């Protein structure tokens, strides 16, 4: 079934919760979602603000399929990663956003990045207030912040702002965009550079982690990276992942991401195998192992990786869990085998194809196996991935001597 490889993974939410009666209805629903991003001059001088704008432009068009507009400082030049020297307008167009330079009074949900004392009283107006240790989302105003507001703060703020905009568009949530949302990163010890990194898993979480690292700048980029993933880029990947585009479809994720990093001067080792230590102990020479793979058996085996610090992260699945993020650090007070002692619930769960959209597909093609495979794919969003990637980057930079497990839910910040 071709739809398995092309389905927008956020759009799948409408199919899973029974809101639509067909794939076509899901597509029409998401094509009704529009968003505007309003940016004031000076954003490029503040790392968090520039990272927020770039993340908004990258992630929003993957979900707000009715169109994403950019207004404001479209001629200001970006300075980060691959976008250095390009005007914001050109960057926006490369992500599929529409550049609007004139005044437009249409009622469109808008996210503001800049210094705004008062925001327009639209049905959804949300400002980003960027600070050194976190951010506030407010319907009343916005603030660029200072140079102390680092890039990962902006990535997280953008993810949270898009979550609020999505709750408004999809759920019609009455509080979305109508109250202040204040969030701070977990406390950590002294700063630790990434140095020599091993990243296992290049799905939307692994890519969001690297997206954050690249926007943070050369001083935060790892000098050498080992990338492990066996998968290829699909059209479905484009709906969630921040480092791939249409030209990458059909290519190995490892190769695509390696080329992106090598263009920034990072030394990359490519590994195309599943990360599976089996019964053996693996001695790791890398300073940090980041595991962004949705595999309980692998998580349970993380005790077998010795000689390194490990960060393991995962995002929930399903209509009620796709906004939830969990991170573990090892070594810690608990063994991985004790945390994941139970059987993998995902591997044994029955796939539900009773929802109207799946029944419609089954009636069209008669392919029960393909329909079941499609229903079994996880719901995933680029904005939750961005928020999670920023958290993972922060925990990699500022390890905690006390905490070794963290849980977040982006819709309940």
Image: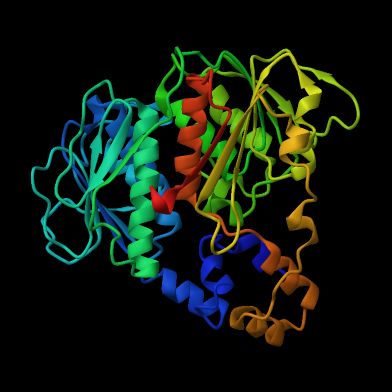
**Residue at x 45%, y 21% (from the top left corner):** 188
Residue 74 image position (x, y, % from top left): 22, 42
Specify whether residue 57 is in view. no
Q: Going by the picture, which residue comes out furthest to the bottom? A: 363
**Residue at x 46%, y 27% (from the top left corner):** 394
In this rendering, would 1 be left or right of 119?
A: right
Q: Going by the picture, which residue comes out furthest to the right? A: 279
In this rendering, would 64 be left or right of 345?
A: left
Q: Going by the picture, which residue comes out furthest to the left? A: 117
**Residue at x 52%, y 20% (from the top left corner):** 399
Residue 143 image position (x, y, % from top left): 18, 36
Numbered circles on residues, count: 0
Quadrant, the N terminus: bottom right
Residue 253 image position (x, y, % from top left): 66, 39
**Residue at x 30%, y 26% (from the top left corner):** 47
In this rendering, would 43 be left or right of 251?
A: left
Residue 90 image position (x, y, % from top left): 31, 42
Q: Where is residue 300, by image quadrant?
A: top right
Determine whether 234 is above or below 271 in the image.
Answer: below
Visual colour scheme = rainbow
Specify whether residue 205 is in view. yes
**Foreground pick, 231 / 21:** 21
**Foreground pick, 331 / 314:** 331
């Amino acid at each position: 079934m071709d739809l398995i490889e092309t389905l927008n993974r956020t759009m799948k939410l409408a199919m899973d919760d029974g809101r639509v009666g067909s794939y076509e209805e899901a597509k029409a629903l998401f094509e009704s979602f529009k968003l505007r991003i309003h940016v004031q001059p000076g954003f490029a001088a503040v790392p968090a603000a520039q990272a927020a704008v770039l993340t908004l432009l990258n992630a929003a068009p993957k979900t707000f399929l009715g169109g994403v507009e950019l207004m404001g400082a479209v001629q200001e030049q970006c300075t980060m990663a691959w976008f250095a020297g390009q005007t914001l307008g050109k960057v926006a167009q490369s992500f599929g956003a529409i550049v609007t330079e004139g005044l437009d009074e249409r009622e469109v949900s808008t996210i503001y990045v800049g210094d705004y004392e008062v925001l327009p009283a639209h049905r959804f107006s949300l400002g980003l207030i960027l600070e050194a240790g976190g951010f506030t989302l407010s319907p009343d105003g916005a603030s660029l912040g200072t140079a102390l507001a680092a890039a990962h703060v902006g990535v997280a703020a953008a993810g949270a702002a898009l979550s609020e905009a999505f709750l408004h568009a999809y759920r019609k949530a009455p509080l979305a965009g109508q109250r202040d949302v204040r969030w701070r990163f977990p406390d950590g010890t002294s700063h630790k550079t990434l140095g020599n990194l091993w990243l296992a898993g290049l799905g939307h979480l692994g890519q969001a982690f690297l997206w954050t690292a690249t926007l943070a700048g050369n001083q935060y980029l790892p000098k050498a990276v080992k990338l492990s993933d066996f998968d290829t880029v699909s059209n479905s990947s484009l709906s969630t992942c921040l480092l791939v585009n249409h030209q990458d479809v059909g290519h190995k994720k490892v190769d695509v991401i390696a080329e992106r990093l090598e263009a920034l001067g990072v030394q990359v080792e490519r590994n195309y195998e599943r990360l599976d230590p089996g019964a053996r102990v693996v001695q790791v020479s890398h300073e940090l192992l980041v595991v962004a793979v949705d595999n309980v058996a692998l998580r349970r085996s993380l005790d077998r990786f010795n000689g390194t610090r490990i960060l393991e992260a995962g995002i929930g699945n399903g209509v009620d869990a796709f906004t939830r993020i969990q991170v573990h650090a090892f070594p810690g007070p608990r063994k991985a085998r004790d945390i994941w002692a139970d059987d993998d619930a995902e591997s044994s769960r029955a796939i539900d194809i009773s929802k109207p959209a799946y029944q419609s597909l089954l009636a069209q093609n008669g392919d029960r196996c393909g329909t079941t495979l499609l229903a079994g794919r996880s719901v995933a969003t680029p904005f939750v991935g961005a928020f999670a990637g920023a958290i993972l980057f922060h925990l990699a930079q500022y390890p905690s001597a006390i905490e070794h497990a963290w849980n977040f839910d982006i819709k309940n910040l």
